[in-house]
Image: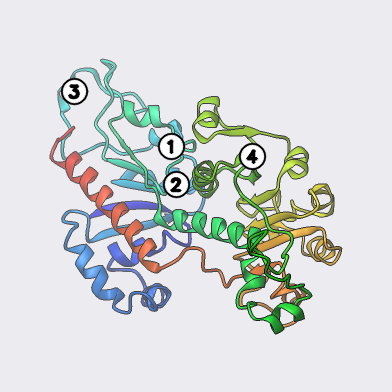
């Protein structure tokens, strides 16, 4: 049976339900419920996809929680799927021989070394056909080592990541234009209740745009967007920022290669400088002990008065107490959160007091329709299927 080793990631757990008939029923029910609001017949969707995957379905799915686990399971793997786990040359050397296509001539003549190479210096045929990145950034995969072993490296521009980037931009635009605050505030009573003065029409001398004198409106063009974390989503946002003619700066632990900076039109800044120079700040990092509370009192104090902060990654990247203090002081031009400190939110959440003002709180909807995730899963499965079939049939 085909064997796929998969990083133990919450989204990738869908693959077990699609490909492995031995997946426990509670797992299947939980995944079906996850998709139910957009795909009520998830089992039917799986069956239709399985028909497109001869040679891949049915498969045995094995999850690896760390790199050691990945290396331990690779010997009998036909394919590997990772998001953040590193696939190093040493791990690839654990891949087992391709018994179906093994030419024993050189092995019998010269023998093999421990890395699976024949003594004549040629790489031995491996069962492993493909290493699939669940994304587009392959820095955690030794691509050269894969190529030397005839292992395909596949990537996936995830529609889910595009949807999250769109949400980040939607929040930036809505906060820049004060759309949440001004939605429906159009008649005189509501405008005056909002503290706005309605100026009289004087068409002989001037137009009537913004007749209520709304202040604090921002234009993205020419503004500085600071992205903290230029990973998959950060790069999707960067592409959109360039189209809006924004100045783009970024910070992360390891700067991008110069050619990537040029592609995105991005400049690296130290963290403190990014916070001080940005009109809009996007926090887009994985949550771990190093990043928890990264945006704290010191960072928020460095922001320009009136800057907009958007977080579509994890709420805990921003220190909640420091955030509430900054909002109460009136220093933020806007805050957009797609993720909250508890989901559903605690009724006593202090941020709820700012609803209807310059704060937009969303119920974790950035990934958009489940059709995005289903399309990603289908593309990934088809890539696995084609690479494994090509290996088995001796195609290059």
Q: Quadrant of residue 297?
A: bottom right
Instruction: Give the mark nearer the N terminus: 1 vs 4.
Output: 1
Identify the residue shown where x is 56% and y is 57%: 168
User: In terms of depth relative to the viewer, which is nearer, 28 or 198?
Assistant: 198
Under circle 3, the secondary element is helix
Disc 1 to disc 4, how far (Cα)? 33 Å
Disc 1 to disc 2, how far (Cα)? 8 Å
Quadrant where the N terminus sits is: bottom left
> On the image, numbered disc 4 is attached to which residue?
250
Under circle 2, the secondary element is helix
Identify the residue shown where x is 22% and y is 63%: 49
Instruction: Give the mark nearer the N terminus: 3 vs 1.
Output: 1
Give the numbered dot on residue 91: 1
Instruction: Give the mark nearer the N terminus: 3 vs 2.
Output: 2
User: In terms of depth relative to the viewer, which is nearer, 261 or 39?
Assistant: 261
Farthest top residue in view? 120
Disc 4 to disc 3, how far (Cα)? 55 Å
Give the numbered dot on residue 115: none
User: In terms of depth relative to the viewer, which is nearer, 5 or 76?
Assistant: 5
Instruction: Give the mark nearer the N terminus: 4 vs 3.
Output: 3
**Nearer the camera: disc 1 or disc 4:** 4
Circle 1 Cα neighbour tier, 10 Å, few/some/many (<14 / 14–19 / ≥20): some
Q: Is residue 203 left or right of residue 75?
A: right
Circle 3 Cα neighbour tier, 10 Å, few/some/many (<14 / 14–19 / ≥20): few
> On the image, numbered disc 3 is attached to which residue?
108
Say above or below: 107 vs 198. above
Q: Is residue 196 left or right of residue 339?
A: right
Disc 3 to disc 1, how far (Cα)? 25 Å
**Nearer the camera: disc 3 or disc 2:** 2
Cβ–Cβ under 8 Å for marks 4 and 3: no
Quadrant where the C terminus sits is: top left
């Amino acid at each position: 049976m085909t064997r796929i080793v998969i990083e133990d990631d919450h989204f990738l757990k869908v693959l077990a339900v699609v490909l492995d008939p031995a997946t426990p029923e509670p797992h299947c029910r939980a995944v079906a419920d996850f998709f139910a609001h957009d795909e009520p017949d998830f089992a039917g969707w799986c069956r239709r996809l399985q028909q497109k995957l001869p040679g891949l379905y049915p498969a045995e799915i094995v999850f690896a929680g760390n790199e050691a686990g990945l290396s331990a399971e690779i010997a009998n793997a036909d394919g590997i799927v990772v998001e953040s786990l590193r696939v190093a040359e040493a791990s690839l050397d654990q891949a087992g021989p391709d018994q179906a296509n093994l030419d024993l001539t050189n092995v019998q003549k010269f023998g093999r070394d421990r890395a699976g190479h024949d003594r004549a210096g040629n790489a031995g045929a491996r069962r492993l056909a493909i290493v699939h990145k669940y994304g587009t950034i392959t820095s955690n995969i030794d691509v050269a080592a894969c190529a030397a072993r005839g292992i395909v490296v596949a990537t996936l521009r995830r529609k889910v990541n595009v949807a999250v980037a769109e949400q980040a931009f939607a929040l930036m635009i809505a906060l820049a234009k004060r759309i949440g605050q001004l939605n429906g505030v159009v008649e005189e009573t509501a405008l005056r209740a909002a503290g706005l003065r309605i100026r009289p029409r004087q068409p002989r001398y001037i137009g009537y745009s913004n007749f209520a004198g709304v202040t604090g409106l921002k234009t993205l063009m020419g503004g500085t967007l600071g992205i903290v974390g230029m990973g998959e989503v950060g790069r999707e946002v960067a592409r959109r920022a360039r189209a809006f003619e924004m100045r783009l700066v970024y910070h992360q632990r390891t700067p991008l290669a110069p050619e990537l900076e040029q592609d995105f039109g991005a400049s690296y800044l130290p963290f403190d400088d990014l916070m001080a120079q940005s009109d809009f700040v996007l926090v887009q990092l994985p949550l771990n002990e190093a990043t928890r509370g990264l945006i704290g009192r010191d960072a928020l104090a460095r922001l320009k008065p009136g800057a907009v902060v958007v977080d579509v990654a994890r709420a805990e990247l921003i220190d909640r107490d420091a955030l509430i203090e900054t909002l109460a002081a009136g220093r933020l031009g806007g805050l957009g959160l797609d993720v909250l400190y508890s989901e559903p939110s605690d009724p006593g959440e202090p941020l709820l007091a700012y609803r209807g003002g310059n704060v937009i709180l969303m119920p974790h909807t950035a990934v958009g329709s489940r059709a995005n995730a289903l399309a990603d899963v289908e593309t990934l499965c088809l890539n696995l299927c084609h690479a494994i079939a090509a290996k088995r049939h001796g195609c290059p």
